[in-house]
Image (tube, rainbow, N blue to C red):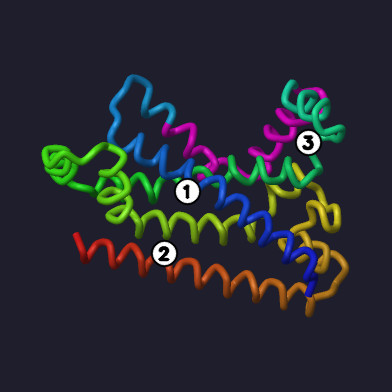
Amino acid sequence: MDWIALTLSFKLALWTVAVLLPAGIYLGRFFAWQRFKGKSLIEAACALPLVLPPTVLGYYLLVSMGGNSTIGKFYESLAGQPLVFSFTGLLLASIIFNLPFAIQPMQRSFEAIDPDVRSAAACCGMSPWKIFWAIELPLAWPGIVSAMVITFAHTVGEFGVVLMVGGSIPGETKTVAIAIYDRVQAFDTSGAGLMSAVLLLLSLVAIAVAYATTGRYGKRN
């Protein structure tokens, strides 16, 4: 077992969840209730990682964050190191790649909230902020939990984007998925099998939690 790679994967997943939790709530709520021109196009752009091959998305991220790009040059001028093949670049790529996994379950949860509930709360004198904290978040919480669990598991197991943007730098960008690939290349089937079993178990738990929270939400509504 490559514990350094596994720890790095968990670190990447936790940071991805930490960023996408508030961003997903905001965007999910916004897409659920706002109507504006071009909404479908923006939603489609956020959902692109669901259908794009990871290597294709990784290529475009690599180009957009590389040393010749505006983003890459700006980051390098501030940090003194390239953005690609670094943990920061890997985190940025992970956030973009996991956008639909975070936004869509939350959006569906906010869409399921009866607008009359919000209207009644407003008529009772509750402020929009209080309505959000006291009514909307508790009702949408199962979808939020499901989104974060899936995002975490998906980040830990991601391979294509990680390889394209981060490479395989031990302790910096070499995640457990890359470690499994390296073990297979080295014909270390026992090591690859052990790490694969860990990811399999993690994925099973994540899906079980997602189904459990979604089922509880459906029964309550």
Q: Residue at x 43, y 69 (%)?
A: 209
Question: Quadrant location of the C terminus?
Answer: bottom left
Position in image of residue 167 (x %, y %): 81, 48
Q: Residue at x 52, y 43 (%)?
A: 99
Mark 2 element type: helix
Q: Badge 1: how crowded within 10 Å, few (<14), some, or many (20+)?
A: many
Position in image of residue 9 (x %, y %): 69, 60
Which image quadrant is residue 177 in? bottom right
Q: Amino acid at mark 1?
A: Ala
Residue 210: numbered disc: 2
Position in image of residue 85 (x %, y %): 81, 43
Front-lying residue, 86 or 199? 86
Residue 83: numbered disc: 3
Q: Residue furthest front?
A: 125
Q: Main secondary structure of the magenta part?
A: helix
Nearest to N terminus: mark 1 or mark 3: 3
Nearest to N terminus: mark 2 or mark 3: 3
Q: Give the residue number, with chain letter if any, for mark 1.
A: 102
